[in-house]
Image (tube, helix red, strand yellow):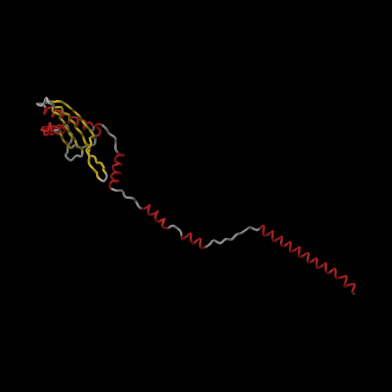
Amino acid sequence: MNDNNMNSSPVSESGVNLWIYLLGMLSSILALALIYIILNSPLVIHKEVPVEVIREVVIEVPVEAIKEVGAEVEVERSFTVDEQLRLYYGKMYLDSLSVSGDEVLGDIESYQVRVFLTDTIKTYESAVSSKFELALRRNNVPLSKDSSYALDLSIAALKEDAGRFTYVVTANVKDSVYSIRGPKMIEIWVPIWSFYYYGYAGEDVVEEMLLESTEKAAEAVALAYLRVK
């Protein structure tokens, strides 16, 4: 009995050792399998967005800036009277036509006659004025006191020591234009067509020569006016 008991003890210890070995191997296999699964699985990172940050972004929308931009677009700048006049006449200047010579008389409907004589021959002013208007009407040149175009006849005469007169006759067609001077507008008569004539006359025939020169000036105006009609 004793011999049998002593022979069975070593077999029992080897069996235990075998189970321990098998369990160790199984644990190693499971550990390796778990490591393999972890390494080959996609990495997913979950990050929470702070609610406070989102709220701050919504609250900080620049509403005032949007309103200011809208106001700048909607508000139109009004022009002063001076600026409006400059724009108006500037446009007229850009749209204007360049004409010269007798063509400047093309659209004139009537003339306002004015006569000017120097003091040396002032006594003949009435006779010269009547002669000038009569010659113009005879040549079908329309006259009107309300016209914005002036037809000026100017005669300047110089009396010499010997009693002889030297005189210059000028006929000017003048346009009434306006000039902007700061906040004011002024009217200016600007010559747009001219005729010149000069001559000499003795003291005893000076009136006759002045009337003759006046008629020549009227005929020159009439010829230019009818040429463009």
Residue 134 picture location, percent across and down: 13, 33
Q: How many marks?
A: 0
Residue at 76%, 64% (x, y): give it: 24
Residue at 29%, 39% (x, y): give it: 93
Residue 91 picture location, percent across and down: 30, 42
Residue at 28%, 46% (x, y): give it: 82
Above or below: residue 101 compared with residue 187: above
Residue 10 picture location, percent across and down: 85, 68
In this orientation, which residue lies closer to the viewer: 102 or 164? Answer: 164
Quadrant into which the C terminus falls: top left
Residue reaching furthest left?
204
Q: Is residue 138 left or right of residue 57?
A: left
Residue 210 picture location, percent across and down: 13, 29
Q: Quadrant of residue 15?
A: bottom right
Q: In this view, does 27 lie to the left or right of 166?
A: right
Residue at 16%, 39% (x, y): give it: 145
Q: Is residue 2 left or right of residue 196?
A: right
Residue reaching furthest bottom?
1
Q: In this view, does 189 lie to the left or right of 58?
A: left
Quadrant into which the N terminus falls: bottom right
